[in-house]
Image (cartoon, helix red, strand yellow):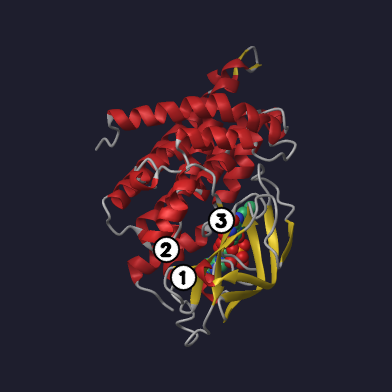
Amino acid sequence: MSYMTEERKLIQQTAREFAMKEVLPLANRLDPEQGDIPMELREKMARMGYFGILIPQEYGGLGLGAFEYVLVTEELARAWMSVASIIARGNGIWGDLSEEQKRKYYPPMARGELLGAFSLSEPEAGSDLASISCRAVRDGDEWVINGSKTWVTFADGADFIQLFARTQPAPDERRRYLGISQFLIFKPRGSLPPGVKGSPIRKIGYFGWKTWELHFENCRVPASALVGEEGRGFYAMMSGLELARVHTAARAIGLARGALEDAIEYAKQRVQFKRPIAEFQWIRFKLAEMATEIEAARQLTYFVANEMDSKRRCDKEASMAKWFASEMAERVTSAALQIHGGYGYTKEFAVERYWRDARLTRIFEGTSEIQLRIISNRLLGSIE
Ligand SMILES: Cc1cc2nc3c(=O)[nH]c(=O)nc-3n(C[C@H](O)[C@H](O)[C@H](O)COP(=O)(O)OP(=O)(O)OC[C@H]3O[C@@H](n4cnc5c(N)ncnc54)[C@H](O)[C@@H]3O)c2cc1C
């Protein structure tokens, strides 16, 4: 089945040109020095509509679906994964928003003027998100937040932090996913909210923005900061993560494709034993395997995006795409680095960036093991 309509081909082609012209040169320059994604690039992305792909037209977005989101994501990630990631910081807010909230937040999000950071993970709650312990307590017209969060990418650069905190104790250990609520904490760009202290984590890749450890100490937010139904934030988290997993699959595919394209170029021009290394059978077959693996991941991801757009349940399939694409990306980017020989192990070639960033796709938005847990639970029934 071909999903590629003329309109989709055009979206893909436009994103490809944008990524290669506007993003790749910046990535090659800024990633090695751990520089941030420049504001001018964010503004250009906003003009392309990339922060509003999924936002309905009535709220100022492009009103497209997960499929188009995936197409644009692959192209941006082919140049720089962080840039493919930042589009997820517009493109809507997880959970059920009221009409009033949509009218207020979606138009500036679609314009790239209101971008968020996600704060789910905690030092003691990573894969097991139902066990989060950061607390929000109601005090008159405000909520008071206390606790520690970690891995908050873009906490400084965002206009708001989408925070998950416990507002009620869990009824019992088995149902500890109940009692978690979602808050939007607004703040000026470039700073942390009052009552929040933190520091950037010294990570090994995913440069272009910083990832923070945060401590909330009596951070006060208005009652209106609560979005969705109180105590049911875990459901918003799970459905949000479903889209995030397809988005991650597309990011992994983009990285692998960047590595493949670079490896082909390199193999054609690098001469050893008096011939281009592209003439050696191991290299040829390896490139053939890489291309095939990428296509398999892409078709699975297209299928899942299409299911999502058709409003069919696809949590298992989203996990399959995320697991398959991210495992594939690590193998493919590593093989591409190998084809570059020693030069691949330097900052002179982009392949090391693809490799470092691909490694992360197996960890965030639910580790590979958590994806296998979701898939196997659906196949065999849950054992917990
Ligand atoms: C660079 C970076 C950016 C990030 N950005 C964000 C962000 O913006 N917002 C946010 O909220 N989070 C973010 N994260 C957090 C990320 O989602 C978590 O790291 C991830 O969910 C894993 O949690 P953990 O690190 O606590 O690992 P753990 O949950 O402690 O897992 C450790 C190991 O145990 C395995 N494991 C755990 N449970 C099981 C199980 N039941 N069965 C089998 N194996 C299991 C895991 O697969 C893993 O191999 C980011 C992480 C990184 C590294």
**In the image, residue 82 lies at what x, y percent?**
59, 42
Q: Is residue 54 visible?
A: no
Query: Of the residues under marks 2 and 3, which one precedes in the sequence?
Result: 2
Q: Is mark 2 within 8 Å of ligand 1?
A: no
Residue 34: mark in rendering: none
Which residue corresponds to the image point at 55% horizontal and 49% vertical from the top-left? Answer: 115
Q: Secondary structure at mark 1?
A: helix
Give amino acid for label 1.
Gly
| Location of the N terminus (image quadrant) | top left
Looking at the image, which residue sits at the far top?
274
* Quarter of the rendered structure image containing ligand 1: bottom right
The image quadrant of residue 205 is top right
Q: Nearer the viewer, residue 266 or 114?
A: 114
The residues tagged by marks 3 and 1 sit, at their Cα atoms, a distance apart of: 19 Å
For residue 233, the mark is 1
Cα separation, mark 1 vs mark 2, equals 7 Å
Seen in the image, is 201 located left or right of residue 375? right
- Which amino acid type corresponds to the residue marked 2 in the rendered image? Gly
The residue under label 3 is which amino acid type?
Phe
In the current view of this chain or complex, which residue is farthest to the left? 1
Answer whether labels 2 and 3 touch (C-beta < 8 Å): no
Q: For the point 42% across and 50% down, which residue is it?
A: 246
For label 3, the residue is 364
Task: Identify the residue position indicated by label 2 in the image.
Answer: 95
Q: Secondary structure at mark 3?
A: loop
Label 1 or label 2, whichever comes before in sequence order = 2
Within 10 Å of disc 3 (Cα), the crowding (few <14, some 14-19, many 20+) is some
Can you tell me whether the CB of the residue at mark 3 lies under 8 Å from the nearest atom of ligand 1?
yes
As drawn, 10 above or below 321: above
Q: Residue furthest front?
A: 141
